[in-house]
Image (spheres, helix red, strand yellow):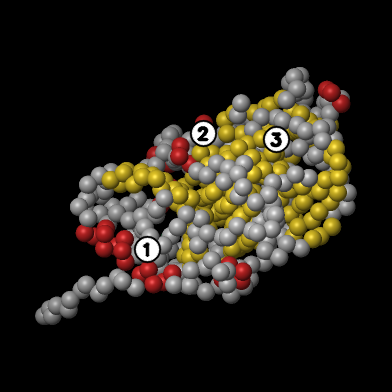
Amino acid sequence: MEMQYLQGFGNYLQSEAEPNVLIPGHNSPQKVPLGLYAEQISGTAFAMPRVNNLHSWVYRILPSVMHGDFKNFSHPKLLGTPFDGMTPPTQMRWGPPPYPKKPTHFVGGLMTMAGNGRIDLHCGGALHLYAINQSMQDEFFYNADGDFLIVPQEGDLIFKTEFGILEVVPGEIIVIPRGIKYQVILKQENARGYICENFGAPFRLPDLGIIGANGLANPRDFQIPVANYEQRKGNFTLIGKFQGHLWSAPIDHSPLNIVAWHGNYTPYKYNLNLFNTIASVSFDHIDPSIFTVLTSPSTTLGVANIDFVIFPSRWIVADNTFRPPYFHRNIMSEYMGLITGKYDAKEEGFVPGGSSLHNSMTAHGPDAEAYEKAVNQSLQPEYYAGTLAFMFESCYVWRVTQQALTAKFREADYLDCWKGLRWNFKYTHRE
Ligand code: FE2
């Protein structure tokens, strides 16, 4: 059974795959039952205020120090900071990435689209796509650089993690916090999706202010795994991502060997269909911050290092209102993806698996077709069904990578979608 996850609210949970491993009151007993080793994993500084303090105690067959020397290996498509390439202010859009022809597992199938900030200063993030056709079997992965917020778009996945197993399907997300080891197993032939790697403060639920105690993503709908250990021995590889590079070390046992744990630093998943959408019931739009699922705050109050925002199926009822997302330019930088269905500012052209990038102060908005439809439609309450788009929004400019700029699946003609917007105004002489 999966349990609820209450990140950022001071709740500490526990799970045992074997009975009586956890000893009340003692995190690090002189002898752990069953000959296990105690280890603490801290996701925040020790002295972080309690409300945001993330840490877990784990009781495992062998401690995590038991592996060989790390050796660097290259992964030409996975990039880290500094993201310092020339980024044009042009609006950009990509189709879905192609699936690989050669056997490719989750780590091998990563491709970095953009990034910002600094890994070593714990600021900013990176945006990756994954397109894979192979499960991880003898490889185990962890990322010391940041959390992975993974948004599957096609293909169900099984995440075997140190804390237990989580299955994720398109429409759900999973967050694997910094440092946690795992494998990704395919349930179908192929899988692809989006990843936001967060170098900054861990994702948390946004505060609700005068919305009150309920709404948006509710804490009770976040799920975490239960303890589930392996006793596998063999010639395995531990892959670490550290300072933007990949490292491999031999390991002679599965590191998924935690028999019991307690704490609040674990992987978690969330079904985006459970997001309680809030919007205007009179006229006009509320700012899209109301669609925030998770936020990684920066050090400036109200400014996000990264926000994860979704545009799900919802009633659209605003009266005398231009209903699609309006034309705008803003300080934040927006990378969008489409999980399923259509996006109401661009009903054609922006396809599931595709993505778009509108950086700071780059103008964007509905395409000509969506504009014409919106200004002429009769405004009845409308259920916008079967859609799920999302955005990774940062206060730092997303510096696009050279491989994303020149990718075959980039749409060279994206700007044409606004070409049909007509000059309707007719000059009127006024004295
Ligand atoms: Fe926008």
Question: Residue 430, located in which quarter of the rendered image?
Answer: bottom left
Query: Residue 303, position in %: x, y?
Result: 51, 55
Image quarter hosting the C terminus = bottom left
> With 167 as the anchor, is 39 left or right in this view?
right
Task: Report helix, strand or loop for mark 2.
Answer: helix
The numbered disc on residue 163 is 3
Task: Report helix, strand or loop for mark 1.
Answer: loop
Query: Residue 67, position in %: x, y?
Result: 86, 45
Do we see residue 175 in this rendering? Answer: no
As measured in the structure, the alpha-carbon distance from the residue carrying label 2 to the one carrying label 1 is 32 Å
Query: Residue 244, position in %: x, y?
Result: 71, 60
As measured in the structure, the alpha-carbon distance from the residue carrying label 3 to the one carrying label 1 is 42 Å
Question: Which amino acid type is marked by label 3?
Answer: Phe
CB at disc 1 and ligand 1 closer than 8 Å: yes
Do we see residue 61 in this rendering? Answer: yes
Question: Which amino acid type is marked by label 1?
Answer: Gly
Q: Mark 3, residues whose alpha carbon is within 10 Å: few (<14), some, or many (≥20)?
A: many
Q: Which of disc 1 and disc 3 is earlier in sequence?
A: 3
Question: Which amino acid type is marked by label 2?
Answer: Asp
Question: Circle 1 sits on which residue?
Answer: 365
